[in-house]
Amino acid sequence: MIGALRSRVRTNGAAPLLTYYDLASGERTEFSARSVANWVDKTTNLLDELDARDGIIASPLALSHPAHWVSLIWPLASWQAGAEYRVVGAADTAGADVAVIGPDEVAPTDAEVTIACSLHPLALGLRNLPAGVLDYSTEALSCSDLAHPAPLAPSQLAWTDAARQLTHADLVALQPQTGRVLVRAAGAFDTLRAAIISPLLGGGSAVLVVGDSDPERLARLRASERCVE
């Protein structure tokens, strides 16, 4: 997947890859492939600084906020760092190099390092964190935006959750998406697949919509964003 992202940056880096809508707050954030790669590179370098390359990244964030755009950055960065990404609860982070949590219940986990993500629209950080918890925005934004991908074997485990285990070969075998599609928020893997993985594989893009909305509003949004589905 990292190869697909880097190829997209080279060939069509400025075009939208992901447009994120939070209907409750009114947030609309658009990311080109280059913008996504920038966040992925900064996060990869943060994992480097934490000595977490080739390790295990546990993500309670993917359970509590599976469709936030920050939740989609972390698996890509984990894979670029050569790490396995696991979707687990905060009580199941023992043995992980890094645990990634959201802003709702900020407390240290059993991982070696705990990182809290504010999920603020402007990437503002969290304040007054307890000892043992790092702020994602503060740490990542201070990192370089040029990272070197780790070598990945096709058989290497990439993703683990309660329903599936997927290798990197499994990821690149997923169905590609060529057009611009509207994606409704779902579980962690289904959202990542529809909003990031399939568009990267097929050269498409996604409009990811979080929050309740009536069909007419979604139809207007689909038309305004020129979605084909």
Image (cartoon, rainbow, N blue to C red):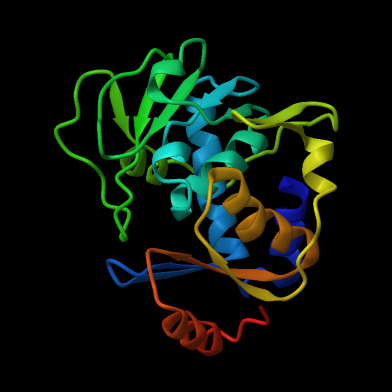
x then y, percent, for residue 205: 65, 70
Considering depth in this image, is 192 or 154 the residue closer to the camera?
192
**Residue 34: percent from left, percent from top:** 60, 62
* Whether residue 102 is situated above or below residue 155 in the rendered picture: below
Quarter of the view holding residue 106: top left
Residue at 22% across, 41% down: 126
Residue visible at 59% across and 28% down?
162
Is residue 177 positioned above or below 154 on the image? below
Question: As rendered, which of 140 and 193 lies closer to the eye?
Answer: 193
The residue under the point 58% across, 21% down is 56
Of the 4 image quadrants, the one containing the C terminus is bottom right
Residue 112 picture location, percent across and down: 43, 14
**Whether residue 145 is visible:** no
Relative to 52, residue 182 above or below: below
Asked if residue 176 can be seen in this view, the reply is yes
- Residue at (54% x, 54% y) in the render: 38
User: Hey, which residue is sitting farthest front in the picture?
Assistant: 215
**Count of all numbered marks drawn on residues in the image:** 0
Foreground: 167 or 161? 161
Q: Position of residue 192 (x, y in %)?
A: 60, 51
Please tell me whether residue 24 is drawn above or below residue 175 in the rendered image: below
Q: Residue furthest left?
A: 128
- Decide if residue 96 is on the left or right side of residue 181: left
Residue 54 occupies quadrant: top right
